[in-house]
Image (cartoon, coloured by chain):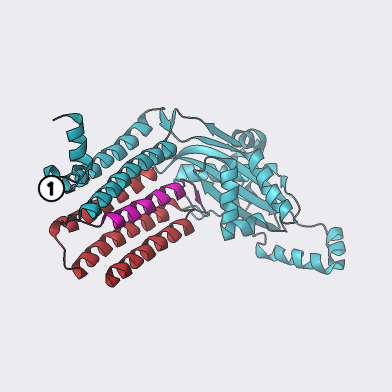
């Protein structure tokens, strides 16, 4: 059997393959499921035991600040200033999430974002927190926050004046994770300024927002890094990783090639069968093509990043 | 033939709904996986119901749709790595 016969047997409906390409037979489909499962398990195994496979990450606090301020500026809002205590609070929050293995605004032992802010020595009148994990670029993080109504509302809140960032790489619940913590805040407005603000009706509305997150009368429990904020803050502002093979790009390419080939075989089979008018027991090729095209669309929309 | 077109319109609705839901939960990978697997399950169900109504259901067809759905599910789990 030469190459052409093998190719016809695999890809063209013919009496040798019971008028259905061998590549579309049930046993071939089962083989694909097993092959893809082995591929999946191999990737899981290799990525934890070698540096070849990994996740390309290029996130910087400076870019996050620039992106945040660009969005605020285009919304006609004041830009935010970077705050060392808020960055310290963000770094402490990220470390706490890695240490206790959680992905939430409140820790399993009941610690809230406000505890970290107060612990870092920042007296706030209003504060907020945005979280992101496993994004590959700074712009990707800002874009995702802007696409989410609740994160967007936080990012574009007029009453915020300061912001702090932490970008930390580590292992969260057994998975390599890059966490981004963004904490917003504003310190209480001095009395003299409040008096001026009250003269302008528009500004009175803004000061009313202060009540949304009043400072809590919590016991002041400073975190260990409070005494040395600068080194901690600097250590968690950037994560840059360039693995030899980026897992999301690699898996997307494999999925695209695999589905592309399957769609082509299905289309060829459908065309030949329609032309010959063959009657056979099989599923609908057009339906399979539509379904696989949707899965291709899913693969294009799939992002590793998550928000909270 | 008219029923055939209606079935394909329903399939298009299922796939478009799945795509919209997948996009809607784009900031949560686990929800995306859930939507993807639900879409695959809906496709398998559609295939079986369609062939039952067409009165040409065969065990081979059922297995074929299940395996097509399984291929999609394993691919989605791989893409979510």
Q: Residue at x 20, y 33 (%)?
A: A4
* Residue A258 vertical position relative to residue B49 in the rendered view, above or below: above
How many numbered circles are shown?
A: 1
* Residue A47 vertical position relative to residue A69 in the rendered view, above or below: above
Q: Residue at x 16, y 57 (%)?
A: A279
In the image: residue A119, left or right of residue A22: right
* Residue A157 vertical position relative to residue A87 in the rendered view, above or below: below
Chain painted red: B
Residue A92 place in picture, x, y as percent: 57, 43
Magenta-colored span: A281-308
Q: Residue at x 60, y 43 (%)?
A: A139
In the image: residue B50, left or right of residue A175: left
Host chain of mark 1: A
**For mark 1, does the 10 Å Cα neighbourhood hold few (<14), some (14 to 19), or many (20 or more) residues?**
few
Q: What secondary structure is marked by label 1?
A: loop
* Quadrant in which the N terminus of chain A appears: top left
Residue A303 visible in the shown view = yes
Chain painted cyan: A
Q: Looking at the magenta stretch, what is its main secondary structure?
A: helix
Which residue is under mark 1?
A18
């Amino acid at each position: 059997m030469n190459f052409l016969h093998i190719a016809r047997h695999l890809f063209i409906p013919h009496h040798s393959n019971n008028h259905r390409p061998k590549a579309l037979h049930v046993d071939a489909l089962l083989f694909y499921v097993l092959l893809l499962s082995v591929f999946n398990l191999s990737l899981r195994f290799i990525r934890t035991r070698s540096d070849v496979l990994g996740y390309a990450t290029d996130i910087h606090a400076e870019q996050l600040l620039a992106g945040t301020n660009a969005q605020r500026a285009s919304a006609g809002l004041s830009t935010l200033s970077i705050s060392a205590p808020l960055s310290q609070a963000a770094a402490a929050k990220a470390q706490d999430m890695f240490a206790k293995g959680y992905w939430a605004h409140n820790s399993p032992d009941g610690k809230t974002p406000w505890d970290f802010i107060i612990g870092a020595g920042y007296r706030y009148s209003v504060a907020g927190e945005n979280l992101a994990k496993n994004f590959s670029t700074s712009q990707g993080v800002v874009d995702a926050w802007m696409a989410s109504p609740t994160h967007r509302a936080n990012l574009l809140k007029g009453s915020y004046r300061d912001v702090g960032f932490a970008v930390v790489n580590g292992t969260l619940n057994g998975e390599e994770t890059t966490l981004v913590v963004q904490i917003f805040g504003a310190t209480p407005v001095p009395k003299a300024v409040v008096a001026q603000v009250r003269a302008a009706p528009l500004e009175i509305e803004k000061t009313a927002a202060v009540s949304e997150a009043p400072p809590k009368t919590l016991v002041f429990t400073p975190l260990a890094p409070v005494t040395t904020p600068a080194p901690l803050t600097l250590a968690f502002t950037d994560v840059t990783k360039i693995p030899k093979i980026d897992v999301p790009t690699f898996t997307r390419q494999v999925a695209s090639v695999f589905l592309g080939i399957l769609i082509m075989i299905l289309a060829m089979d459908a065309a030949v069968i329609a032309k010959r008018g063959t009657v056979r027991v099989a599923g609908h090729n057009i339906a399979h093509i539509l379904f696989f095209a949707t899965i291709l669309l899913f693969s294009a929309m799939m992002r590793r990043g998550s928000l909270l | 033939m008219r029923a055939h077109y209606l079935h394909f319109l329903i399939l298009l609705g299922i796939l478009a709904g799945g795509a919209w839901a997948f996009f809607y939960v784009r900031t949560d990978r686990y929800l995306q996986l859930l939507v993807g697997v639900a879409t695959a399950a809906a496709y398998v169900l559609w295939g079986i119901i369609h062939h039952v109504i067409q009165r040409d259901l065969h065990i081979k067809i059922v297995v074929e749709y299940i395996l097509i759905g399984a291929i999609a599910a394993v691919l989605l789990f791989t893409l979510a790595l």
